Amino acid sequence: MPNMTHPHKKRRISDLPAELLEVILTKLPFVDNIRSSAVCSSWNSATTQTPLCAQTPWLMLPSDQEHDFTTCRFFNLAENKVYKMKNVFEGLGYDVWCVGSSHGWLVILDDEANPHLFNPFSRVQIQLPLFTDELANVNNLRKSFITKAILLADPSRSNDFVVVMIYDYDFASRLAFYKQGDKTWTKLVGANQDYCDIICHDNQLYALADNRSVEVWEFQSSSPTKIMSIEPSMQLKDVEKFPRNNNISTKFYLVKTSNDDVLFIERFIGNFVNAQGFVVDESYLLSSNDTQPLVCPYRTKMFFVFKLDFKLKRWEKVESLKDQVVFLGGNQSMSVSSHDLSECKPNSIYFTDDRWYEMDLDNLYGGHDLGLFNLDNESIKPFYHSDLEKIDPPPFWITPNPW
Protein backbone atom coordinates (compact mmCIF):
# COMPACT_ATOMS: atom_id res chain seq x y z
CA MET A 1 0.00 0.00 0.00
CA PRO A 2 1.49 3.38 -0.97
CA ASN A 3 2.67 5.72 1.77
CA MET A 4 0.03 8.50 1.98
CA THR A 5 1.95 10.76 4.40
CA HIS A 6 3.04 14.11 3.01
CA PRO A 7 6.41 15.58 3.78
CA HIS A 8 6.28 18.59 6.07
CA LYS A 9 6.37 21.91 4.30
CA LYS A 10 9.75 23.59 4.74
CA ARG A 11 9.46 26.71 6.85
CA ARG A 12 11.72 29.71 6.44
CA ILE A 13 12.86 31.88 9.30
CA SER A 14 11.09 34.82 7.66
CA ASP A 15 7.78 32.95 8.20
CA LEU A 16 7.99 33.45 11.96
CA PRO A 17 4.75 35.16 13.06
CA ALA A 18 5.18 38.91 13.56
CA GLU A 19 3.77 38.80 17.09
CA LEU A 20 6.25 36.13 18.17
CA LEU A 21 9.15 37.94 16.48
CA GLU A 22 8.26 41.15 18.32
CA VAL A 23 8.30 39.33 21.67
CA ILE A 24 11.73 37.89 20.87
CA LEU A 25 13.20 41.20 19.75
CA THR A 26 12.07 43.05 22.88
CA LYS A 27 14.16 40.59 24.94
CA LEU A 28 17.39 40.95 22.98
CA PRO A 29 20.39 43.07 23.99
CA PHE A 30 21.72 45.64 21.54
CA VAL A 31 24.35 43.45 19.81
CA ASP A 32 21.89 40.59 19.20
CA ASN A 33 19.31 43.09 17.94
CA ILE A 34 21.79 44.33 15.32
CA ARG A 35 22.56 40.76 14.28
CA SER A 36 18.83 40.02 13.98
CA SER A 37 18.34 42.96 11.63
CA ALA A 38 20.76 41.29 9.19
CA VAL A 39 18.84 37.99 9.03
CA CYS A 40 16.34 39.01 6.34
CA SER A 41 14.32 42.01 5.16
CA SER A 42 11.28 41.21 7.32
CA TRP A 43 13.42 40.93 10.44
CA ASN A 44 15.22 44.16 9.55
CA SER A 45 11.87 45.93 9.27
CA ALA A 46 10.67 44.46 12.57
CA THR A 47 13.81 45.52 14.49
CA THR A 48 13.39 49.15 13.42
CA GLN A 49 9.80 49.20 14.72
CA THR A 50 10.26 47.27 17.96
CA PRO A 51 11.42 49.15 21.07
CA LEU A 52 14.64 47.88 22.58
CA CYS A 53 14.62 46.24 25.98
CA ALA A 54 16.51 47.92 28.82
CA GLN A 55 20.11 48.31 27.68
CA THR A 56 23.32 48.51 29.67
CA PRO A 57 25.14 51.75 28.83
CA TRP A 58 28.33 51.42 26.82
CA LEU A 59 31.48 53.42 27.48
CA MET A 60 32.71 55.40 24.47
CA LEU A 61 36.50 55.72 24.40
CA PRO A 62 39.09 57.13 21.99
CA SER A 63 41.55 54.85 20.21
CA ASP A 64 44.28 53.28 22.32
CA GLN A 65 46.74 53.73 19.44
CA GLU A 66 48.84 56.89 19.24
CA HIS A 67 47.93 59.28 16.39
CA ASP A 68 44.80 57.25 15.53
CA PHE A 69 42.07 59.90 15.46
CA THR A 70 39.58 57.92 13.38
CA THR A 71 38.83 54.94 15.62
CA CYS A 72 36.37 54.86 18.52
CA ARG A 73 36.20 52.08 21.06
CA PHE A 74 33.01 51.05 22.84
CA PHE A 75 33.27 49.06 26.05
CA ASN A 76 30.22 46.83 26.53
CA LEU A 77 29.80 46.50 30.27
CA ALA A 78 27.45 43.51 29.91
CA GLU A 79 29.97 41.47 27.92
CA ASN A 80 33.12 43.02 29.41
CA LYS A 81 34.20 43.43 25.80
CA VAL A 82 35.53 46.30 23.66
CA TYR A 83 34.23 46.91 20.15
CA LYS A 84 36.25 49.05 17.73
CA MET A 85 34.60 51.22 15.07
CA LYS A 86 36.49 52.98 12.31
CA ASN A 87 35.72 56.45 10.92
CA VAL A 88 32.87 57.05 13.37
CA PHE A 89 33.11 60.85 13.10
CA GLU A 90 34.05 60.96 9.43
CA GLY A 91 33.41 64.40 7.96
CA LEU A 92 33.31 66.06 11.38
CA GLY A 93 37.06 66.47 11.84
CA TYR A 94 39.73 64.80 13.94
CA ASP A 95 39.03 66.60 17.20
CA VAL A 96 35.32 66.05 17.86
CA TRP A 97 34.30 67.02 21.39
CA CYS A 98 31.25 65.49 23.08
CA VAL A 99 29.15 67.64 25.44
CA GLY A 100 26.18 65.36 26.05
CA SER A 101 24.62 61.95 25.63
CA SER A 102 20.99 60.87 25.92
CA HIS A 103 18.52 58.56 24.12
CA GLY A 104 21.49 56.93 22.35
CA TRP A 105 22.52 60.22 20.69
CA LEU A 106 25.58 62.38 21.26
CA VAL A 107 25.64 66.17 21.27
CA ILE A 108 29.00 67.00 19.73
CA LEU A 109 31.08 69.96 18.59
CA ASP A 110 33.14 69.48 15.45
CA ASP A 111 36.59 70.95 14.76
CA GLU A 112 35.07 74.38 14.24
CA ALA A 113 32.88 74.15 17.36
CA ASN A 114 29.74 73.70 15.23
CA PRO A 115 27.11 71.68 17.16
CA HIS A 116 25.54 68.44 15.88
CA LEU A 117 23.37 65.61 17.07
CA PHE A 118 25.03 62.34 16.16
CA ASN A 119 24.18 58.66 16.55
CA PRO A 120 27.49 56.76 16.39
CA PHE A 121 25.78 53.44 15.66
CA SER A 122 23.46 54.48 12.80
CA ARG A 123 25.83 57.33 11.76
CA VAL A 124 22.80 59.63 11.42
CA GLN A 125 23.77 63.27 11.88
CA ILE A 126 21.58 66.34 12.53
CA GLN A 127 23.07 69.82 12.20
CA LEU A 128 22.15 72.20 15.03
CA PRO A 129 22.17 76.01 14.78
CA LEU A 130 25.49 77.74 15.33
CA PHE A 131 26.06 79.57 18.59
CA THR A 132 25.71 83.33 18.36
CA ASP A 133 28.26 85.74 19.81
CA GLU A 134 25.55 86.75 22.27
CA LEU A 135 25.66 83.26 23.75
CA ALA A 136 29.32 82.48 23.59
CA ASN A 137 32.88 83.45 23.05
CA VAL A 138 33.77 81.08 20.22
CA ASN A 139 37.33 80.67 21.51
CA ASN A 140 35.95 79.06 24.67
CA LEU A 141 33.34 76.86 23.01
CA ARG A 142 35.05 73.54 22.83
CA LYS A 143 35.81 72.55 26.40
CA SER A 144 34.43 75.16 28.76
CA PHE A 145 31.41 76.91 27.24
CA ILE A 146 28.93 74.02 27.45
CA THR A 147 28.68 72.14 30.75
CA LYS A 148 26.14 69.59 29.51
CA ALA A 149 23.55 69.09 26.76
CA ILE A 150 20.63 66.64 26.69
CA LEU A 151 17.69 65.65 24.50
CA LEU A 152 14.06 65.69 25.66
CA ALA A 153 13.06 63.07 23.06
CA ASP A 154 14.66 60.51 20.77
CA PRO A 155 15.09 62.05 17.26
CA SER A 156 14.86 58.50 15.87
CA ARG A 157 11.23 58.32 16.96
CA SER A 158 10.08 61.94 17.31
CA ASN A 159 10.07 64.98 15.04
CA ASP A 160 9.45 67.25 18.03
CA PHE A 161 12.69 66.74 19.89
CA VAL A 162 14.27 69.47 22.01
CA VAL A 163 17.93 69.98 22.92
CA VAL A 164 18.69 71.79 26.17
CA MET A 165 22.14 72.87 27.28
CA ILE A 166 23.84 74.42 30.29
CA TYR A 167 26.21 77.11 29.08
CA ASP A 168 28.52 79.60 30.75
CA TYR A 169 27.35 83.19 30.45
CA ASP A 170 28.76 86.15 32.34
CA PHE A 171 30.31 83.91 35.04
CA ALA A 172 27.06 82.00 35.55
CA SER A 173 25.64 78.73 34.20
CA ARG A 174 22.40 79.38 32.29
CA LEU A 175 20.01 77.31 30.16
CA ALA A 176 19.32 77.55 26.44
CA PHE A 177 17.29 75.32 24.14
CA TYR A 178 16.70 74.40 20.52
CA LYS A 179 13.38 73.03 19.26
CA GLN A 180 13.34 70.99 16.05
CA GLY A 181 12.81 73.44 13.19
CA ASP A 182 14.11 76.52 15.02
CA LYS A 183 16.77 78.64 13.35
CA THR A 184 18.58 79.65 16.54
CA TRP A 185 19.21 78.72 20.15
CA THR A 186 16.94 80.47 22.64
CA LYS A 187 17.73 81.48 26.19
CA LEU A 188 15.30 79.89 28.64
CA VAL A 189 13.40 82.87 30.06
CA GLY A 190 12.85 82.60 33.80
CA ALA A 191 15.77 80.21 34.31
CA ASN A 192 17.80 82.54 36.50
CA GLN A 193 19.66 80.10 38.73
CA ASP A 194 23.25 78.90 38.44
CA TYR A 195 22.66 75.40 37.03
CA CYS A 196 24.85 72.33 37.43
CA ASP A 197 22.85 69.41 35.97
CA ILE A 198 19.83 68.71 33.76
CA ILE A 199 17.92 65.53 32.95
CA CYS A 200 14.86 64.55 30.92
CA HIS A 201 11.97 62.62 32.45
CA ASP A 202 8.59 62.07 30.76
CA ASN A 203 9.53 64.70 28.14
CA GLN A 204 10.01 67.29 30.87
CA LEU A 205 13.21 69.08 31.85
CA TYR A 206 14.47 68.70 35.43
CA ALA A 207 17.15 71.25 36.32
CA LEU A 208 19.40 71.22 39.39
CA ALA A 209 20.88 74.50 40.60
CA ASP A 210 24.00 75.13 42.67
CA ASN A 211 21.84 75.94 45.72
CA ARG A 212 20.40 72.37 45.44
CA SER A 213 17.02 73.61 44.23
CA VAL A 214 15.10 71.74 41.52
CA GLU A 215 13.00 73.14 38.68
CA VAL A 216 10.73 71.26 36.29
CA TRP A 217 9.98 72.72 32.84
CA GLU A 218 7.30 71.77 30.32
CA PHE A 219 8.16 72.18 26.62
CA GLN A 220 4.90 71.08 25.01
CA SER A 221 3.55 74.61 24.47
CA SER A 222 5.08 77.21 22.15
CA SER A 223 7.01 78.72 25.05
CA PRO A 224 8.57 76.57 27.79
CA THR A 225 6.80 76.84 31.13
CA LYS A 226 8.21 76.29 34.61
CA ILE A 227 5.69 73.99 36.32
CA MET A 228 7.57 73.37 39.56
CA SER A 229 10.29 75.01 41.62
CA ILE A 230 11.38 73.66 44.96
CA GLU A 231 14.32 74.58 47.21
CA PRO A 232 14.70 71.66 49.61
CA SER A 233 16.48 72.05 52.91
CA MET A 234 19.27 69.76 54.05
CA GLN A 235 20.25 68.73 57.56
CA LEU A 236 23.67 70.06 58.55
CA LYS A 237 24.79 66.71 59.98
CA ASP A 238 24.40 65.17 56.51
CA VAL A 239 26.78 67.58 54.81
CA GLU A 240 29.52 67.52 57.45
CA LYS A 241 30.44 63.85 57.06
CA PHE A 242 33.24 64.49 54.58
CA PRO A 243 35.98 67.16 54.79
CA ARG A 244 35.33 70.24 52.69
CA ASN A 245 38.43 72.33 52.07
CA ASN A 246 40.57 73.76 49.30
CA ASN A 247 41.96 70.30 48.51
CA ILE A 248 38.51 68.90 47.69
CA SER A 249 36.23 69.88 44.79
CA THR A 250 32.57 68.88 44.51
CA LYS A 251 30.19 68.22 41.62
CA PHE A 252 26.40 67.95 41.82
CA TYR A 253 24.18 65.59 39.82
CA LEU A 254 20.42 65.11 39.50
CA VAL A 255 19.02 61.62 38.93
CA LYS A 256 15.51 60.22 38.44
CA THR A 257 15.48 56.54 39.41
CA SER A 258 13.55 53.79 37.68
CA ASN A 259 11.11 53.82 40.61
CA ASP A 260 10.58 57.61 40.25
CA ASP A 261 12.65 58.86 43.17
CA VAL A 262 14.50 62.16 42.60
CA LEU A 263 18.11 61.97 43.78
CA PHE A 264 20.71 64.63 44.44
CA ILE A 265 24.23 63.18 44.28
CA GLU A 266 27.31 65.00 45.52
CA ARG A 267 30.71 63.87 44.20
CA PHE A 268 33.90 64.64 46.14
CA ILE A 269 37.11 64.91 44.11
CA GLY A 270 40.58 65.22 45.61
CA ASN A 271 42.36 67.89 43.59
CA PHE A 272 45.73 66.20 44.15
CA VAL A 273 45.88 62.52 45.13
CA ASN A 274 49.20 60.77 45.69
CA ALA A 275 50.17 57.21 44.76
CA GLN A 276 48.97 55.95 48.15
CA GLY A 277 45.49 57.36 47.54
CA PHE A 278 45.71 60.26 49.99
CA VAL A 279 44.47 63.74 49.16
CA VAL A 280 47.43 66.13 49.50
CA ASP A 281 48.01 69.86 49.47
CA GLU A 282 49.46 71.43 46.33
CA SER A 283 52.62 72.28 48.28
CA TYR A 284 53.19 68.51 48.66
CA LEU A 285 53.95 68.32 44.93
CA LEU A 286 57.09 70.41 45.47
CA SER A 287 58.24 68.78 48.71
CA SER A 288 60.30 66.12 46.98
CA ASN A 289 64.03 66.36 46.37
CA ASP A 290 63.35 65.71 42.70
CA THR A 291 63.78 68.61 40.30
CA GLN A 292 60.33 67.95 38.81
CA PRO A 293 57.07 68.29 40.80
CA LEU A 294 55.35 65.07 41.81
CA VAL A 295 52.44 64.01 39.60
CA CYS A 296 49.34 63.66 41.77
CA PRO A 297 46.25 63.56 39.50
CA TYR A 298 42.79 64.48 40.79
CA ARG A 299 40.63 61.51 41.75
CA THR A 300 37.10 60.91 43.02
CA LYS A 301 37.08 59.90 46.67
CA MET A 302 33.44 59.79 47.80
CA PHE A 303 29.77 60.16 46.84
CA PHE A 304 26.84 61.28 49.00
CA VAL A 305 23.30 60.44 47.86
CA PHE A 306 20.13 62.27 48.92
CA LYS A 307 16.47 61.61 48.05
CA LEU A 308 13.96 64.41 47.67
CA ASP A 309 11.10 64.30 50.16
CA PHE A 310 8.49 66.37 48.31
CA LYS A 311 6.19 66.57 51.30
CA LEU A 312 8.83 67.91 53.72
CA LYS A 313 10.71 69.74 50.95
CA ARG A 314 13.95 68.27 52.19
CA TRP A 315 16.90 66.26 50.85
CA GLU A 316 17.12 63.09 52.95
CA LYS A 317 20.44 61.22 53.19
CA VAL A 318 20.29 57.82 51.49
CA GLU A 319 22.49 55.01 52.82
CA SER A 320 21.53 52.49 50.14
CA LEU A 321 20.32 52.62 46.54
CA LYS A 322 19.03 49.03 46.93
CA ASP A 323 18.63 47.60 43.42
CA GLN A 324 19.43 50.87 41.63
CA VAL A 325 22.57 51.40 39.52
CA VAL A 326 23.56 54.99 38.66
CA PHE A 327 25.64 56.19 35.71
CA LEU A 328 27.23 59.63 36.02
CA GLY A 329 29.52 61.80 33.90
CA GLY A 330 29.06 64.08 30.92
CA ASN A 331 26.03 61.97 29.91
CA GLN A 332 22.49 62.53 31.06
CA SER A 333 22.61 61.18 34.62
CA MET A 334 20.60 57.96 34.73
CA SER A 335 19.57 55.16 37.04
CA VAL A 336 18.49 51.64 36.11
CA SER A 337 17.38 48.61 38.08
CA SER A 338 19.82 45.73 38.46
CA HIS A 339 16.78 43.46 38.14
CA ASP A 340 16.63 44.52 34.49
CA LEU A 341 20.41 44.58 33.99
CA SER A 342 21.80 41.75 36.08
CA GLU A 343 25.37 42.35 34.88
CA CYS A 344 25.44 45.70 36.75
CA LYS A 345 26.30 45.83 40.44
CA PRO A 346 23.34 47.06 42.53
CA ASN A 347 23.69 49.91 45.03
CA SER A 348 26.55 51.33 42.97
CA ILE A 349 27.58 54.38 40.96
CA TYR A 350 29.50 53.97 37.69
CA PHE A 351 31.22 57.30 37.01
CA THR A 352 33.40 58.89 34.33
CA ASP A 353 35.60 61.97 34.21
CA ASP A 354 33.69 65.18 33.42
CA ARG A 355 36.32 67.63 34.66
CA TRP A 356 36.73 68.88 31.09
CA TYR A 357 38.30 72.22 31.90
CA GLU A 358 41.42 70.40 33.11
CA MET A 359 41.94 68.34 29.96
CA ASP A 360 44.52 70.75 28.56
CA LEU A 361 46.15 71.80 31.84
CA ASP A 362 48.46 68.80 32.09
CA ASN A 363 49.81 66.46 29.41
CA LEU A 364 50.20 63.62 31.91
CA TYR A 365 46.59 63.13 33.01
CA GLY A 366 42.96 63.99 32.27
CA GLY A 367 39.91 61.90 31.42
CA HIS A 368 41.30 59.24 33.77
CA ASP A 369 38.91 59.64 36.72
CA LEU A 370 36.47 56.78 36.21
CA GLY A 371 35.42 53.93 38.46
CA LEU A 372 32.75 52.06 40.38
CA PHE A 373 31.63 53.37 43.76
CA ASN A 374 29.88 50.91 46.08
CA LEU A 375 27.58 52.44 48.70
CA ASP A 376 27.79 49.36 50.93
CA ASN A 377 31.43 49.85 51.88
CA GLU A 378 32.16 53.23 50.24
CA SER A 379 34.88 51.64 48.12
CA ILE A 380 35.98 52.70 44.64
CA LYS A 381 37.19 50.08 42.18
CA PRO A 382 37.93 50.10 38.44
CA PHE A 383 35.31 48.66 36.11
CA TYR A 384 37.47 49.23 33.05
CA HIS A 385 41.23 48.85 32.98
CA SER A 386 43.30 51.34 31.01
CA ASP A 387 47.06 51.73 30.90
CA LEU A 388 46.60 55.38 29.96
CA GLU A 389 46.63 58.15 32.58
CA LYS A 390 45.36 60.65 30.00
CA ILE A 391 42.26 59.67 28.02
CA ASP A 392 41.49 62.44 25.55
CA PRO A 393 38.69 62.92 24.69
CA PRO A 394 37.35 61.62 28.01
CA PRO A 395 35.15 58.51 28.26
CA PHE A 396 31.41 58.97 27.80
CA TRP A 397 28.42 56.79 28.71
CA ILE A 398 25.99 56.17 25.86
CA THR A 399 22.99 53.85 25.75
CA PRO A 400 23.17 52.13 22.33
CA ASN A 401 20.42 53.08 19.89
CA PRO A 402 20.73 51.41 16.46
CA TRP A 403 18.25 53.71 14.73
Image (cartoon, rainbow, N blue to C red):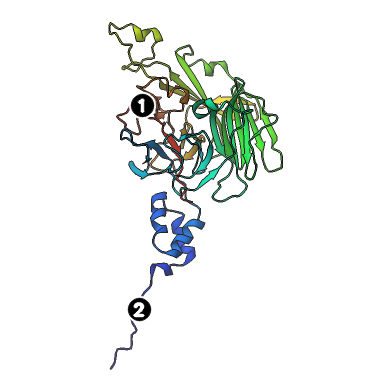
Whether 320 is drawn above or below 218: the answer is: above
Query: What is the quadrant of residue 400 in the picture?
Result: top left
Q: Label 1 to label 2, Cα distance in Å?
A: 62 Å
User: Residue sitting at 54 percent across and 29 percent down?
Assistant: 146
Numbered badge on residue 8: 2
Whether 301 is drawn above or below 116: the answer is: above
- Of helix, strand and loop, which one carries label 2? loop
* Dot placed on the residue nearer the N-terminal end, 1 or 2: 2
x, y percentage for residue 80? 33, 41
Q: Amino acid at mark 2?
A: His
x, y percentage for residue 104? 49, 44
Along the viewing direction, whichever of 365 and 269 lies nearer the viewer: 365
| Residue lying furthest bottom | 1
x, y percentage for residue 138? 55, 28
Residue that numbered label 1 is attached to: 390
Along the viewing direction, whichever of 152 and 266 lies nearer the viewer: 152
Mark 2, Cα crowd under 10 Å, few <14 / some 14-19 / many 20+, is: few
Q: Amino acid at mark 1?
A: Lys
Q: Left or right? Give the position of 314 relative to 11.
A: right
User: Residue sitting at 33 percent across and 34 percent down?
Assistant: 67
Are the residues tagged 1 and 2 within 8 Å (C-beta)?
A: no
